[in-house]
Image (tube, rainbow, N blue to C red):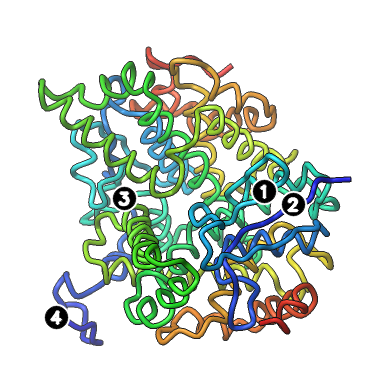
Amino acid sequence: MSLSLTPRSTRSRQQVPALELHSAEPWPENAALYQQLKEDQILLSDNAASLAVQAFLQMCNLPVRVVCRANAEYMSPSGKVPFIHVGNQVVSELGPIVQFVKAKGHSLSDGLDEVQKAEMKAYMELVNNMLLTAELYLQWCDDVTVEEITHPRYGSPYPWPLNRILSYQKQWEIRRKMKAIGWAGKSLEQVLEDVDQCCQALSQRLGTQPYFFNKQPTELDALVFGHLFTILTTQLITDELSEKVKNYGNLTAFCRRIEQQYFEGHDKDGSAAASARSAKRSLLR
Amino acid sequence: MAAPMELSCWGGDWGLPSLHPESLTVMAYAKFSGAPLTVNTINNSWSTPKADVPVLISEDTVISQPAKILNFLRKQRYNADYELSAKQGADTLAYIALLEEKLLPALLHTFWVEAENYCSVTKPWFASRIPFPLSLYLPGKMSREALNRILLTRGGPPLYSLTEVEAQIYRDAKECLNLLSKRLGTSQFFFGNTPTTLDAFVFGFLAPVYKVCFPRVQLQEHLKQLTNLCRFCDDILTCYFKLTITDG
């Protein structure tokens, strides 16, 4: 199968990169974002990822409805949530979704120059490298959290013994990854130190600006919002993680600002504001 | 007076003080901050540590991992970031994360996974510096760990085969190099005229790719097109490592 320059109609779907085939189609009204069940199943890191994508799409003014399915992780093409179903396309994770949306002609970072784009990408990697890894560590490597929160939630839609098998399988997978990148030897205090360092860097970069690149939000703002808002509004065993973020006033103000601008006043069931006020989560103070 | 500090790390070749990115990062930072380190390169004797290299030994303290070593040096008042603003300090962390996520997998692959490179260059070089019979086992272990790390961090669906993962990590690495080149622009160092932590990390990751002569060199070829990054590496080598170049 080679990509030759034949007219679109004669090429089969497999031969054409998906982005090219559908870039001409406008964003449909029935676009859907899939994640795990909000109340009982979804974990901290997945909720952060899902919220980041929702924030990004809101910032681009692209309507999407949030659909909660217990098997969202398995439906996703990359095994990670969230994923969006737009027309005939299924795209998962923030990076590919940003590319997909860009191919449809919407972009938040077009106004940035090359150096700023490099900076934006670097900060997104910082969030993935430190915040996301710390969230995964807390969820899957801290024994108390694993026993009391993660295992019950992760397997909640399934009957015994499937719920335990799936949780242990996932835990083993994540712990292998932590070991490979050198995080398995870290203690919880060290991980919280890393979170603090990351928040400090984000706080210093944000400064007194409304968004990271001054007046307009970009995908970096969406990603940071997704993670920080989830950390601030999720009740864990202790409040240590959210305290680390609360130490930085401009970060909490940033989260509040984005929540007010992009999520309040939208009375959809799947809005972030609604999910933040669900029973298991404490309110953003 | 500060206690004498000794650094154990892998040695160098091809004009570099060390082939190992993390060792090179620490050595570069020590030069930039003026820290008086005695460098002990790992050799065939059994007394030098082999695991968790580079290792800094100062009196009773033993520290491994570059980030911790650099923190220790800063606490001892050897601080190369003294003049940076808060925002520049934050940028440093972000770019280091970018290097680790996007460039490191391809670097590990070039050194340890790419079969021709590993068999003809990496394995003989490291094995010659490790005492027998550890030399039969340790390079293989390092290679397996590198492959493991690449597959666990980058090798999930929709990439199902090693070739697809390889293609993706090299794409990411080339993009990372382009981003670094744009960020550096025409300046001598990343934050003006004096080198800082970020310069140490970038140098540590780029110099091995730039200088080591491998049979399979797609990353090196891409790097050589980014002349400002090559000039950056050469400048640091000539200004800060001139003694070790002549020792070679």
Residue shown at the point (67%, 48%) measured from the top left: B57
Q: Quadrant of the C terminus of chain A?
A: top right
> Which of pointers 4 and 3 indicates the residue nearer the eye?
3
Q: Say above or below: A282 vs A108.
A: above
Q: Which mark is residue B6?
A: none
Disc 3/disc 2 C-alpha distance (Å) = 49 Å
Disc 3/disc 1 C-alpha distance (Å) = 46 Å
Instruction: State the residue position of label 2.
Output: B5
Establish whether labels 3 and 2 are both on one chain. Answer: no
Q: Looking at the image, do the residues carrying marks 1 and 2 touch, with CB atoms under 8 Å apart? A: yes
- The chain that hosts pointer 2 is B
Which SS class for mark 1? strand
Q: Which mark is residue A92?
A: 3
In which image quadrant can residue B237 be found? bottom right
Q: Foreground: B108 or A28?
A: B108
Instruction: State the residue position of label 1.
Output: B57
